[in-house]
Every structure is written in C-alpha cells, then in structure tokens.
C-alpha cells in the first residue's frame, strides 16, 4: 500500500492550566491518502480543530504540550522549528478557517494578499504573481476578476470572501488542504456553492482535503472517510458508507439520531443524555461511558480503536452493536 | 466626498465660534473681574477706570463687545494687548509660533521613533523579560511630570555638572534655525527629550496593546497559515492595522501641542513659545492675547481632528465607503 | 376561542439609511408586506436565509418592533398602535426565546431572579408565590432547583437556553416566538431542547412561531412552514407537503442543497445550486424578488410581481410558474 500523504499517530495536545491539565486531543490516529477527503466530525470540545492546528504549528500558547507523531509525505513534521514549518504552511499544506468575514486583512487588496502568499513560496515576479492571482479568482468563480483583484475584502460578500480564501489557499498547489468549518458561517445556498467549488477544485488540483465540521450532513456529502471525535479521542473511523450505514460507536448512533432529517419526520429525536464532558474531567476509561446507555463494567478501561478498515473505540462486540444500533437508530 | 469635506469645514467653523464665545464669556462676563480696572492700573481713580472702560468699549453690550473684538482680531488684524499697550496680539503669536513648532516637531519625531520601536519590540517578545521592562519604562515616563523632569534636567545640565560633562549644553533660551541651525538643535535637545518622554511612554504602551490584540485576530491566523514569517506578519499585518489608532492619537496630540499644550516644557526651559505666551497672558489677565492664543490653539486642534478624519480614509479602506 | 390566535395583515418594516446621494435618505424594507395567520396550537416554522426578514417579522408580530405599516391582531383584538399600558396585558400572552444563550441572560443576575423577573413586573404575587412558581418552572424545563442562586456563566449553553425557556413560560403565555433557539447549540444538546419544546407544547397547549435557517430542524418541529426571501413570504403551507413537494423555485433549491445524511444508497438528488449571492435588501430587484437567481425566470418575472395566492386549501405561493 502506498505511503499515506498524512499519517497521524497517537497525537496528544494538552494545555497546562491553573485549573489542571486540559487534554484537548488524546490519542488521535488516522491517515489521509492521496486525493482523499477525510471528514473529522464532532461537537464543541471534541478537539477536532485543535488537532489540526497543532499539526501545522498554529497553536501559539506557551502552555501547550504536543506529543505523538505526524508524518507528511513520510517526513516527521511535529516538532519542526517555526521556520521549517513556514515553508510547509501555505505551500504543501494549506488551511482555511470558519469565518470569512474576518479571515482577510482589511487594509490590503485581495490581490495583494494572494500575491503575498505566492511570492513567499516562490520566485515569481510581481507581474507574474498578479496574473496568477487573477487566474485563481476566475477559477473560484469570482466574476470580473481583473477588476476585483484590486478590491478590498469588505467589498466582497461572505460567500465571495470564502472563495477568495480558497483561491489563496490553493495558490501554491498544496497537496493537502485543511478546512476548518469552512461553511458553518454561510447561508445554505452559499454553503452549497462553496462545497461544490471545493469538490470541483479537489478534482482539478488533485489535493487531499481534511474537512472539519460539526455537520454530519456536510460530512456525508463531501467525505470519503470519516473520523468521529469525542472528548479529544477518536470514537470511530471508517469509510463514509460504513460509518453512516453501519455506525459502530454509541456516540455516532446518538449523533446521527439527534440530527433532524429533511425527508421524514420522527416524533422524537434521539438524545444523548447529559452534557458534553468537561475537558478537565475526562474519565479514566472510555470518555463516553458516563453518557452511554450500553455502559458495561469493562468500560472503565479505555478502549483502543478496534477493527481494521472500520474502527471504533468501544468494547461492545459486533452482535451487541447490531442489536443496539437497530433499536435506537431506525426511524 | 465633497459633501464630507463641506460638512467637516462647517462643523469646524461652528466649533471655533463656540469656543470663542465661551472664552469671551469666561473672561468678560465673570462677575468680579473688571478688565477696565486691570488696564487702568492699581492706582486708578473710578473716573479713570470709567474713561478706560469707555475708551476700550467695555461699557457696550456683551454681543457688541464680542463683535468688536472678533473684528479686530480677524479682519482689521490690529487687536492690541491690554497690558502692553500698543503691542498687537497677532504678531506676538506669530513670533512665538515657530518656537513651539520647532519644539513639537522635534519631540514628535523622537517620541514616534522611540514609542513605535518600543511597542513593536515589546509585542514581538511578549512574555519574555524585555516586554514588561519596556512597559515599566513607559509607565515611568508617563508618571513623571514634564515640569519636574525638565527642572531635574536643568538642575543636572545647568548645575554642578555644567562645567564638566554637560558643558556643551547651552543655557535656556531659543535660537532660530535660520540664525544658527546647530545652536537651534542644541538649545532644543533637552526640551525635545523631556517633552518626548511622556508621549513615547504612552505610544509604546498603546501600540503594544494594539499589536497584541491584532496578533489574536483571525486575519493573522490566516497569514500564519499562508506560511509568512512572524516578522512579516508583525509588521505588514498587525502593525499596519494598528497604525490607524496610533495615527489618530498622534494627530490629536500633535494638534494640541502645536496649539500651546507644551506650556510646561516651554516654561521650564525658557522657550518663548505660544504656551508661555498663553501662560503669561493668563497671569496678567491680558484678555485680547488670551483670546488670540485660545483661538490659535483651537484652530490647530480642530484642524488636527479634520486631518485625522481624512487620514483614516487613507489608512483604512473600509472607511472610504462611508 | 377562535382558531386563529394571531393575525397579521400587510406588515411592512422599513428603515431609513443614508443614501449615496448627498442629504437624501433611502428606505430599505426589511419586511415588505407580509400577511399571515397563526393557528392556535400549531407550530408555524419560518425559514429563510440571512437578510430575508424573518427575525424582523417575528419582532413586529409580538410588537417588540413597531411595524412601519400593517396591523396585527391577537385573539381578535388589534394590538398594533396600542399604548404601552394597553399593550401590557397582551404582552403576558406572547413571549420570546432568543438565539444566543450567552447573550440573552443578564450575566449579573442570578438565574432565579432572571426567571422571576417577568413575574415581578406583572405583579404575580408575593415573594413566596413567586419563588414557588420559579421552582415549578425550573422543574418543568428539567433544571435542578439547587441552581437557582447561580449565575448564568456557571451553566452550559443548553442549560442557559432552558433558563430562557423557563423565563418565557413564567406568565403562562399562549404564544411563544422562538428566534433560532437551537442554532447556537451542539447537535446533541439541540435535540434535547427540541424534545423539551415539543413536550412543553403538549403539556401547556402552546402555539409556537419557530424561526430558523436550519431546514431539518424546522421540518421536525413545524406543522406549517413559511419560506421568506428578501422580506417577502414566498411560500406557505403544511410542513410535510411543502417539504415533499415545494412549489416555489427558491424553496425547491433550498431543499435540494440542504445537507442531508447520505449513506450512498439514495439516488443522487438533483441539486439546484443557485448562482449569485443572497441579495441585499437595499437592492431589491423589480418584479419578483427572486427572478435574478431563478432557474426558470422569464421576462414576466422581471416586470410583474407575483401575488401570494392559495393554490390549495393548505398551500400558498407567490410565483408565476409554481413547480408542480
């Protein structure tokens, strides 16, 4: 099997605070192949964003401790110095964020900002960079790009700004694009445009995408493989079809049951009892056990990810899973 | 744009008018203050005072007296001092102005350089030792009053060490730049340093706070994700966005100082600028000169405000739409 | 009691903003002539994207905002234009729940006082009576009464939303307007709050106006759904039939692209991705407001504004060529 593009192994991110150690990410292991879209889904506090920030060296807090291994194209990048990471960021691995309204520097034109990235990683002249910027704006569907390249961010709507951000991220042909909730702040129709654009560009550029979101619907439309996170730990990892059709973890059952469906109405939504676990208070064993209705004694020991292609961090055996899942999951 | 400019100009004129009325009322309508008595002198008899009153038009109605004074000040330009009979107000101010301007210009260059450098270095090294050190120096500079610092500087440079280390420091006073540029600079050196210290402290602290804020903004996160160096992010993104508040602060400080707010420094170093002129005219209750100085100062503050407003549009493209 | 609890006729809300021309001010219409009846006991969902005017409409209906023109009647009595005093007794019957659980509770007040406040304002009774009622409300929304003395920041988002709901229920209102009540909550908490709202509706015989941009949530809770676009109601009808068979092209597009759990078994749906941006209310197109983005628009759509008509007893739409 070819070497995966990105290989994350036992990634741990902890913040040492006065109130205690906050384990934001606690043992994340997954990989991203060439041209693959991996979706990381979870609620707030699941560690999905922090894990990707840590990988790119974007966590600047002095009290953070990052451990584990992250290999990009076979090369270990966790622990690299800032100047080495700078040549990877924006060039080999690009990242886009949630709120397009504040993502761009307000005092420079969008063209200037795209050119800045191009010239930081290459030897293009101003002229060449400007031409490339206009090309990119056209590719992401900004009308009249030659004129709009000189405009400022506030002259673009939210959806347009997100397109600019995507254009900027793709400007140096990165192998991997990490998108942190890229459409959460956008309207449904705009979201559809952006997701369609991302899909199209992924094919054109051949890059892999890590898509972080809380929206199971978006994940199911975009991702080839899905990582479900809870309390900083991976609960379930598998292909899209496997995870959605036959989820293996009680948390995933709860998540999917809690989402109101468009095409049919159910009388009651399945709820996960209790509140999200506090990151200061993650239990010794399975993090989800306190809220799990199928909790057993053995759950006081933390389960590792079990399975081969389709993995779940749960002690239930396959037979139990089939019966419990069908009980709660079906309409 | 034209509408904007017109609106700014008309509001500026309105502000100046209101200030002039206010000053006029304070000095001419305050009970217990009788300008005629002051002008006539201590030993004047009531008749002389009455004569003086009539001669200066002080027995006319308030609005008319206001009108007369404004007429003399702006149109006839022959408004005369009450104390130094015959000395015209406007030339006095125009003579004092270059001194103040020299003082403020030099000090502002210094405080901008030191303040901005201090703010950037502190923000770039936040958390390390040099950051709180710079902030402490800043607060110390702000806390020390200008007149005290000036006097201490004088004490050191003019006192015991005048004959040894500081023999090159001239005694207080002003030399015009056209006369002798070197002497001009030398005379102004310590006044510059004294005046600049307060503002350098303020600017360093303000800039550091703005930079640290900016470095937590989303657009800086995007810049990092682009792979830019920290230095570039600090200067080209964070600093450039913080510039707006620094520039507006500077505009207002500069305008107020040119208008005479550097008074204490001028007094301490014996520089006959507008501040000193205002101060002495207040002591003598020399009302025309007071009025002249106030209007001069108000004009610069109002002008500075307008320039800053227009300057915003250059620095922040979002403002241009509004 | 009549079947219609609230009736709004031709509500218009406009704001005056500075125009690009010197000295003039332009009128921007946030809500442009919406007429709607709310039936007792139903949940009327109002769905739309940003700038469509749904929140503004809701506030105009309960008189939180004064409509520029149009009238609203509650239980048969006209409430638009009433004096504050006269309006007061109607206010007890209509309450709101807001979107942001972090901003809608006063951070300096204890949560018990927050819930008691409406009771005090309307002279519910003495302290003892009020305290008893507050405890009752807390139990009703599933909160521990031991938390009465705590401050909002000590609660999670979902719990804060429950406090907001308790506050809204304090005076036994007949109508509750919920403006994006679950949008700021995680999916699992969202489900809890939606279930709670449903239970409360049954128990207390409430009528809901439920505003949201989330199509799945709206379908789940609503009996009828209204779709808004640029300040106008473009479609209204029974929830199930609207979602299965949308009549307005905008509704059709919206439903076709709303993210859905797709396990690969369903046939690929026909996604209508609209071009252009969600429009700005200050630049309303002529004729039908949706025509610049409509895949089926004709010349008629650009010049003639379609009327909002009933095409069946339970469905109405404003379109020259409704989808059938």
Image (cartoon, grey):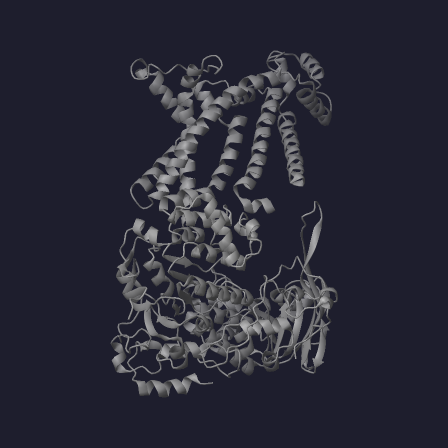
Q: Is residue A71 visible?
A: yes
Which of the image's four quarters has the N terminus of chain B? Answer: top right
Between residues A159 and C300, which one lies in front from this camera angle?
C300
Between residues B291 and A272, which one lies in front from this camera angle?
A272
Question: Could you say which quadrant of the image residue A271 lies in?
Answer: bottom left
Question: Could you say which quadrant of the image residue A177 lies in?
Answer: bottom left
Between residues C48 and B285, which one lies in front from this camera angle?
C48
Specify whether A287 is left or right of B13: left
Q: Position of residue C304 (x, y in %)?
A: 75, 67
Q: Position of residue B136 (x, y in %)?
A: 34, 38
Please count the marks in the image: 0
Question: Could you say which quadrant of the image residue A125 lies in?
Answer: top left
Image position of C61 with respect to B201: above or below: below
Specify whether C155 is left or right of B34: left
Image position of A143 with respect to C86: above or below: above
Q: Position of residue A179 (x, y in %)?
A: 42, 62
Q: Position of residue C169 (x, y in %)?
A: 55, 74
Residue at image position (34%, 38%) is B134
Q: Is residue B198 visible?
A: no
């Amino acid at each position: 099997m070819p070497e995966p593009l990105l290989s994350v192994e036992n990634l741990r991110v902890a913040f040492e605070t006065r109130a205690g150690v906050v384990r934001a990410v606690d043992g994340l292991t997954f990989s991203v192949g060439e041209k693959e879209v991996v979706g990381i889904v979870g609620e707030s506090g699941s560690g999905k964003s922090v894990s990707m920030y840590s990988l790119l060296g974007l966590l600047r807090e002095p009290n953070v401790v990052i451990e584990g291994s992250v290999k990009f194209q076979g090369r270990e990048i966790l622990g690299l110095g800032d100047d080495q990471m700078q040549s990877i960021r924006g060039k080999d691995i690009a990242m886009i964020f949630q709120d397009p309204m504040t993502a761009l520097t307000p005092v420079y034109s969008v063209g200037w900002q795209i050119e800045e990235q191009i010239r930081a990683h290459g030897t293009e002249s101003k002229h060449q960079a400007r031409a490339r910027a206009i090309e990119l704006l056209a590719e992401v569907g900004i009308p009249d790009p030659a004129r709009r390249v000189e405009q400022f961010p506030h002259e673009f709507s939210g959806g347009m700004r997100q397109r600019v951000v995507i254009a900027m991220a793709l400007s140096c042909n990165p192998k991997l694009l990490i998108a942190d909730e890229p459409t959460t702040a956008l309207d449904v129709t705009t979201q559809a445009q952006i997701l369609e654009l991302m899909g199209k560009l992924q094919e054109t550029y051949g890059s892999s995408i890590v898509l972080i979101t809380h929206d199971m619907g978006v994940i199911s439309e975009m991702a080839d493989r899905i990582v479900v996170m809870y309390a900083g730990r991976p609960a379930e990892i598998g292909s899209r079809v496997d995870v959605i059709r036959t989820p293996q973890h009680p948390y995933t059952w709860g998540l999917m049951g809690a989402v109101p469906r468009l095409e049919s109405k159910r009388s009651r939504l399945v709820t996960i009892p209790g509140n999200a676990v506090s990151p200061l208070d993650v239990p010794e064993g399975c993090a989800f056990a306190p809220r799990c209705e199928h909790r057993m004694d053995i759950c006081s020991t933390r389960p590792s990810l079990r399975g081969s292609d389709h993995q779940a961090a749960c002690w239930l055996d396959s037979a139990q899973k089939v019966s419990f899942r069908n009980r709660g999951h079906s309409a | 744009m034209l509408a904007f400019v017109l609106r700014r100009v008309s509001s500026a004129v309105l502000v100046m008018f209101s200030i002039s009325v206010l000053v006029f009322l304070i000095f001419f309508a305050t009970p217990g203050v009788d300008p005629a008595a002051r002008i006539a002198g201590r030993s004047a008899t009531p008749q002389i005072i009455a004569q003086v009153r009539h001669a200066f038009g002080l027995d006319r109605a308030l609005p008319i007296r206001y009108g007369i004074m404004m007429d003399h000040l702006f149109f006839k330009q022959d408004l005369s001092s009450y104390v130094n009979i015959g000395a015209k107000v406007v030339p006095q101010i125009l003579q004092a102005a270059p001194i103040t301007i020299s003082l403020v210009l030099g000090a502002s260059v210094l405080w901008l350089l030191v303040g901005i450098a201090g703010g950037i270095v502190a923000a770039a090294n936040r958390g390390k030792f040099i950051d709180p050190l710079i902030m402490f120096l800043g607060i110390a500079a702000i806390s020390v009053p200008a007149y005290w610092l000036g006097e201490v500087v004088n004490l050191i440079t003019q006192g015991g060490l005048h004959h040894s280390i500081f023999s090159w420091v001239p005694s207080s006073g002003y030399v015009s730049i056209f006369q002798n540029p070197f002497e001009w600079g030398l005379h102004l050196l310590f006044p510059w340093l004294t005046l600049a210290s307060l503002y350098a402290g303020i600017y360093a602290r303000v800039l550091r706070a703005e930079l640290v804020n900016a470095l937590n903004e989303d657009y800086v996160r995007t810049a990092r994700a682009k792979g830019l160096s920290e230095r570039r992010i600090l200067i080209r993104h964070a600093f450039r966005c913080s510039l707006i508040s620094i520039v507006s602060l500077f505009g207002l400080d500069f305008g107020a100082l040119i208008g005479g707010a550097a008074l204490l420094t001028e007094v301490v170093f014996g520089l006959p600028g507008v501040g000193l002129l205002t101060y002495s005219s207040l002591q003598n209750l020399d009302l025309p000169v007071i009025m002249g100085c106030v209007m001069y100062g108000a004009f610069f503050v109002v002008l500075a405000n307008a320039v800053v407003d227009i300057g915003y549009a250059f620095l922040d493209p979002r403002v241009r739409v509004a | 009691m009549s079947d219609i609890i609230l009736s709004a006729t031709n509500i218009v809300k406009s704001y005056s903003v500075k125009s690009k021309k010197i000295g003039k001010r332009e009128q921007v219409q946030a809500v442009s002539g919406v007429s709607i009846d709310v039936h007792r006991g139903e949940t009327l969902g109002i769905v739309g994207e940003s700038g469509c005017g749904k929140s503004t409409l809701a506030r105009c209906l309960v008189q939180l905002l004064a409509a520029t023109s149009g009238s609203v009647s509650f239980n048969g009595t006209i409430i638009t234009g009433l004096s504050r005093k006269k309006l007061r007794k109607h206010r007890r019957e209509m309450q709101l729940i807001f979107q942001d659980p972090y901003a809608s509770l006063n951070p300096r007040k204890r949560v018990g006082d927050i819930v008691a406040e409406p009771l005090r304002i309307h002279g519910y009774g003495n302290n003892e009576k009020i305290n008893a009622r507050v405890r009752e409300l807390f139990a009703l929304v599933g909160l521990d009464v031991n938390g009465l003395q705590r401050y909002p920041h000590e609660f999670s988002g979902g719990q804060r939303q429950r406090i907001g709901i308790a506050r809204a229920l304090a005076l036994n209102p007949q109508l509750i307007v919920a403006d994006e009540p679950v949008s700021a909550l995680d999916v699992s908490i969202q489900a809890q709050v939606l279930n709670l709202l449903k239970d409360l509706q049954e128990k207390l015989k409430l009528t809901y106006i439920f505003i949201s941009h989330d199509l799945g949530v709206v379908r789940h809770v609503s009996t009828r759904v209204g779709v808004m676009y640029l300040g106008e109601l473009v479609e209204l009808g029974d929830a199930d039939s609207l979602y299965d068979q949308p009549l307005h092209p905008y509704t059709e597009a919206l439903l076709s692209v709303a993210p859905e759990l797709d396990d690969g078994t369903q046939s690929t749906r026909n996604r209508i991705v609209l071009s252009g941006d969600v429009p700005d209310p200050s630049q309303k197109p002529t004729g039908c407001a949706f025509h610049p983005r409509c895949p089926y628009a004709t010349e008629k759509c650009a010049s003639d504004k379609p009327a909002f008509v009933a095409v069946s007893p339970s469905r109405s739409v404003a379109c020259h060529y409704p989808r059938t």
